[in-house]
Amino acid sequence: MAAAVSTAVEQGDTPLQLDVGLLASFDFNPISARAFKKDPEGVLQARARNATQHLVNTLFQLPIERHATYGPLASLPAFETELPREKPVPKPKPLTKWEKFAKAKGITKRKKDKMIFDEERQEWVPRWGYQGANKKLEDQWLVEVPTNADDDYRPDREAAKERKARQAKNEAQHQRNLARNAAAPAAPKGELGSGVAPSRARRRAALEADLLRARGSTASLGRFDKSLEGESKPRGVKRTFQPNEIDAGQERAAHLELLAKMGKGEPQMNLRKAIKYASKAQGSKALAEKAARRRK
């Protein structure tokens, strides 16, 4: 007779923590260095068995439902541990032209069934695809020919031609929707931590702006700094020029303003700057002494 297995659980100084939704058990109690050095495998197996036994005991306390095929089933609660995402949150699919119109008008879309009932064959057939109802006219052995049809009129070929024209029209509309969504301005990105990471182009633009600010913090405004490999050159100030042909009223006003400045009796020369230039930055006194020496 096999020995009974104990289901007792040792909690230790720190109680064991469970996340039943993820079938996870956590033991944060420290491991004794002396016992681990003596028998590492035995210590790890004992800790793992204790945590697993605590999880199994909790699972047997959950409400159980009887299933006809699978037998007793226990419903796990919602997990508490937040797992990190491997990939970013998927972006919402852009709306098509019809979806935008339907949303503005409050039109609700009714999904069509894939299977429809054929009254002639008295069976369910697919709406599209192989042996679909959209090819019903192509497969009929007897078709009424219009009175104005040509002698070489083929109803099956005309039906197939119309069906392919509808497919081409739908594909063209799909491509126009893709081009329209690609040309539309991107939606504003959320801040960091909101679940939506900023795009690569946005991060690159922010890094380039920081680099330009750091480059302009030197005394030479980055003019004599060593440029890195692949570094973009800073853009200078773009000069703007007046057009060659301007309004006659603007040209007349500019000429009158120039004549008004010339008509004022005030000197248009900076005397202080002229004295400084003539005296070689020695001042008006040195310039007067130099002139007096010349007169002697």
Image (cartoon, rainbow, N blue to C red):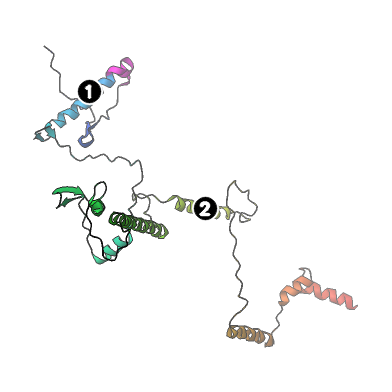
User: Of helix, strand and loop, which one carries label 1?
Assistant: helix
The residue tagged 2 is 208
Task: Say which amino acid is labelled 2.
Answer: Glu
Residue 166: % across, % down:
32, 57
Q: Which residue sits at x=28%, y=54%?
A: 156
**Region in magenta:** 32-42
- Vertical arrangement, residue 262 with respect to residue 217, above or below: below
Residue 184: % across, % down:
40, 60
The residue tagged 1 is 49
Instruction: Report the quarter where the C terminus lies.
Output: bottom right
The tally of labels here is 2
- CA distance separating discs 1 and 2: 55 Å
Pick out the residue farthest to the top: 1
Judge left or right: residue 92 versus residue 270.
left
Query: Is-magenta flag for residue 38?
Result: yes
In terms of secondary structure, what is the magenta stretch mainly? helix
Task: Say which amino acid is labelled 1.
Answer: Arg
